[in-house]
Image: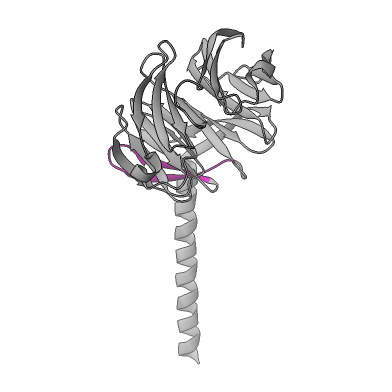
Amino acid sequence: MNNIMKLNQNKLKLVLNLLFIHLCFSSVSQSKYEWIEKSNYKIDSNDIWTVDVLGNVYISKKELIQKFDSIGNFKFSQSQKSFGRLSSIQVLNSMKLIVFSEEQQQLCFLDNTLTPYESCVNFDDENIGNATKFAVSSQPDKFWIYDQLNSRLHLISSRQLFQNQDVENIKGVLNSIQISFMFEQNNFLYLVDYNQGIYILDRYASLVNFIKRPTIKSFQVDSENFYILEKNKIVLIDVDSNEEINIDAPIQKIIEFKKIGNNYYFRTGKEIKKYHLLLNK
């Protein structure tokens, strides 16, 4: 009986020691970073949004485009009736925006007060069957257009309306089911398929890498890391070493996020929350 009691006591000590070690490691892991909430913005489930490098937030809400500054103060609004329903807003620079309407099959340009300027780019004469995604290119006055109907990737110019580049059967080339969104960064074009992962193309639209992530929800990249939203965590993947770090997101039910510097904008169905990520050494 005494031997049994001693054995049970030893097991209990082992369990308690393992629990203590786990709690210590958890504490250390949590202390490495801290989310600090900075501001929030109201948004409906059907609204479109983006953020510029200065932290200004743009929201397409029903018949209006609205601009808010980096601390959430309202700045400007502009009617978007002439653009139709917007599918995407992207930033050319802190002074210029470009809006894409899948409904109207066109790109239009706005200044930093949301005032339209220049003529819109219409796809009627571009041999584009049904543009569903677009991305600003680092090449001056050029844009990537994804033609879902014909499974083509186009590079077009807003100055000279002719097709500069055309990749046929892009879904077949990538073995992709659906292109969910795309953007260009650091001279690479990123095409994201929520069911497959991230396809990385060079400036000539040749596939150079693929990151398999079948549970991806949103994606960003800078010169150091890939930032992948999966469920309720952000996965940081080092661009050079491929080393991964998991960081729990500060809120749940995140639809997508954007990263500007060390600020993260998490969008849910009802709001955008801005957080600063403090990495502790």
**223 w.r.t. 120: above or below:** below
Query: Which residue is at a point 44% across and 14% down the rendered structure image?
Result: 158
Is 239 included in the stretch rendered in magenta? yes
Question: Height in image: 1 above or below 154?
Answer: below
Q: Is residue 235 magenta?
A: yes
Give the side of residue 41 with respect to residue 197, left or right.
right
Hey, which quadrant is residue 14 in on the image? bottom left
Q: Residue 79 versus residue 70: which sits nearer the camera?
A: 79
**Observer able to see residue 281:** no
| Protein image colouring | one colour
Q: Is residue 69 left or right of residue 276?
A: right
270 vs 112, left or right, is: right
Which SS does the magenta portion mostly show?
A: strand
Residue 144's x, y, as percent? 42, 26
Residue at the limit of the structure toward the bottom, as seen here: 1
Q: Nearer the viewer, residue 86 or 222?
A: 86
Picture residue at 49% right of the left edge, 78% below the top: 9
Work out whether residue 32 or residue 1 is closer to the camera in this orientation and state it.
32
Quadrant location, the C terminus: top left
Image location (x, y in percent) of residue 129: 49, 31
Q: Please identify the quarter of the rendering in which residue 280 is found.
A: top left
Where does the image place residue 28, in percent across and percent down from the top left? 45, 47
- Point out residue 153 in the picture as x, y percentages from the top left corner: 40, 32
How many marks are shown on the rendered structure? 0
Task: Specify whether residue 127 is in view.
Answer: yes
- Name which residue lies at 43% across and 38% down: 151
Q: Nearer the viewer, residue 115 or 215?
A: 115
Question: Magenta stretch?
Answer: 233-250
